């Protein structure tokens, strides 16, 4: 336990920050992070001291570089599956660890940024911020290149500029995340007798699973190691349309940042929430319009499944059912949620049927997965904005029959002790951004 003087010293090092709910007002100021009535949750500080070790990962993969054909953007790492450089072989983007890195997550409802500083074997949280997309993304884009963010490049770039400025971000290099709904992620099985021909076979097999021409995607894959004897080899395939890759490059250029790499969201989530944990588990990312299930075993993604239901559905149901405004509906989800108290049944009775449907789909997908693998799911980790629904952890445990927890990506970082209660509360919102920022600090 720290002495009183040491505690006071740490508080001087990192200035006290108000809870985001206290940031009310329409003017930009040093204490309230607003830009023309566009709210932004932000914190900025420099931490001296503290201890935390960034998890190390061991990642064995085969890289299909020749098939992607995307070689003109040599300054950007479009390797969606983070690789470990083997002895005698190096990748330019892994040649030197940066001292600072920014993780950017452009969501459907809000966008987040996290800046980390690398020091020794520690990742230190320097600043973070969240800004609502409303007020920025005004001009829909009808082309396919929207990629989960179907708005004009200039709108997204302007949002990123304000988010970075109001969050006091000083890093210029960023890892941006691509929505899971904008990528194709699947597992393909090959006979073990064809292990030497997998590199040639993957592009042809991928045509069966990727619904657009292979020439129009950036394609990557990795072999999923198995400790169980098997006659087959499982390969994880990831494909992202080149139009989406090009859109993110344009957006980054318009925002004045250096795009260090792109990464599909589930991989960022695994890095920030799973780490060394070998437990078979599911990361349930409840976003604004969709919920993504990422099945992980021994730190590797085994399956990604998207459900077309998100937290927005709950908000709209409360607005219609109780004739209340959006802000009151959002607050009711946090404060009352799935409460069983009689006086709060008016609200919970609207939410419970929708949550029942969502968890029935989660349970069904888990059952299908468990029938196919020797190691059954033992834990469910709920993250994303929907994780703030009061009572959802207890409800999930009762319906799924396994341990259910709320994800906190900040637990992997060095943070000031006095900020930890606030970060614990905000954690589910920043799981993707933290995982992206950690990418350059870890071997995979």
Image (tube, helix red, strand yellow):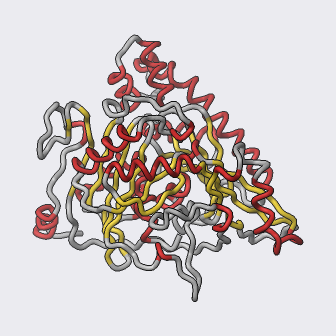
- Of all residues, the one furthest to the front in this rendering is 72
- Image: 148 above or below 120: above
101 with respect to 38 (left or right): right
Which residue sits furthest bottom? 88
Residue at x 71%, y 47% (from the top left corner): 213
Depth check, front residue: 4 or 248: 248
Residue 259 position, x and y percent, is 41, 59
> Residue 147, position in %: x, y?
53, 41
Q: Nearer the viewer, residue 206 or 56?
A: 206
Q: Quadrant of residue 218?
A: bottom right
Image spot of residue 267 (x, y percent)? 55, 57
Asked whether residue 307 is in view, the answer is yes
Q: How many marks?
A: 0
In-image side of 23 versus 106 (left or right): left
Q: Quadrant of residue 397?
A: top right
The answer to whether residue 280 is seen in the rendering is: no
Rendered view: 67 above or below 323? below
Q: Name the spot of residue 415 as percent of width and height, x first.
A: 29, 62
Q: Nearer the viewer, residue 338 or 249?
A: 249
Of residues 418 and 192, which is closer to you in this image? 192
The residue positioned 53% from the left and 69% from the top of the image is 444
**Measuring 86% from the left and 70% from the top, which residue is drawn there?**
194
């Amino acid at each position: 336990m720290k002495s009183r003087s040491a505690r006071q010293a740490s508080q001087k090092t990192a200035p006290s920050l108000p809870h985001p709910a206290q940031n009310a007002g329409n003017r930009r100021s040093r204490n309230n992070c607003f830009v023309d009535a566009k709210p932004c949750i932000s914190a900025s500080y420099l931490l001296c001291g503290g201890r935390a070790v960034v998890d190390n990962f061991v990642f064995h993969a085969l890289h299909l570089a020749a098939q992607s054909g995307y070689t003109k953007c040599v300054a950007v790492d479009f390797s969606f599956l983070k690789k470990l450089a083997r002895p005698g072989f190096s990748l330019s983007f892994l040649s030197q660890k940066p001292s600072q890195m920014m993780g950017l997550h452009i969501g459907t409802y809000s966008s987040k940024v996290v800046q980390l500083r690398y020091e020794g074997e520690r990742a230190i949280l320097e600043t973070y911020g969240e800004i609502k997309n409303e007020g920025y993304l005004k001009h829909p884009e009808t082309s396919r290149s929207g990629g989960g963010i179907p708005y004009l490049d200039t709108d997204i770039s302007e949002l990123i500029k304000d988010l970075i400025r109001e969050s006091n971000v000083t890093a210029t290099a960023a890892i941006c995340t691509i929505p899971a709904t904008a990528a194709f992620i699947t597992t393909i099985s090959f006979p073990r007798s064809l292990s030497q021909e997998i590199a040639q076979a993957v592009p042809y097999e991928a045509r069966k699973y990727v619904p657009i021409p292979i020439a129009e995607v950036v394609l990557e894959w990795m072999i999923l190691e198995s400790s169980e004897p098997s006659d087959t080899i499982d390969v994880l395939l990831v494909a992202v349309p080149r139009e989406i890759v090009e859109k993110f490059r344009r957006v980054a250029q318009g925002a004045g940042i250096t795009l260090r790499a792109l990464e599909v969201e589930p991989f960022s989530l695994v890095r920030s929430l799973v780490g060394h944990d070998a437990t078979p588990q599911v990361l349930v990312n409840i976003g604004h319009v969709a919920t993504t299930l990422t099945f992980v075993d021994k730190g590797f993604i085994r399956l990604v499944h998207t459900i077309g239901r998100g937290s927005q559905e709950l908000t709209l149901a409360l607005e219609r059912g109780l004739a209340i405004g959006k802000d009151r509906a959002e607050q009711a989800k946090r404060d009352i949620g799935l409460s069983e108290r009689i006086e709060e049944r008016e609200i919970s009775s609207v939410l419970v049927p929708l949550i029942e449907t969502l968890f029935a789909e989660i349970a069904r997908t888990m059952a299908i997965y468990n029938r196919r693998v020797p190691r059954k799911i033992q834990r469910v980790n709920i993250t994303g904005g929907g994780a703030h629904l009061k009572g959802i952890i207890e409800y999930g445990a009762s319906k799924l029959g396994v341990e259910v927890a709320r994800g906190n990506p900040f637990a992997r970082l060095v943070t000031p002790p006095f900020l930890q209660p606030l970060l614990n509360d905000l954690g589910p919102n920043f799981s993707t951004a933290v995982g992206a920022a950690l990418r350059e600090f870890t071997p995979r």
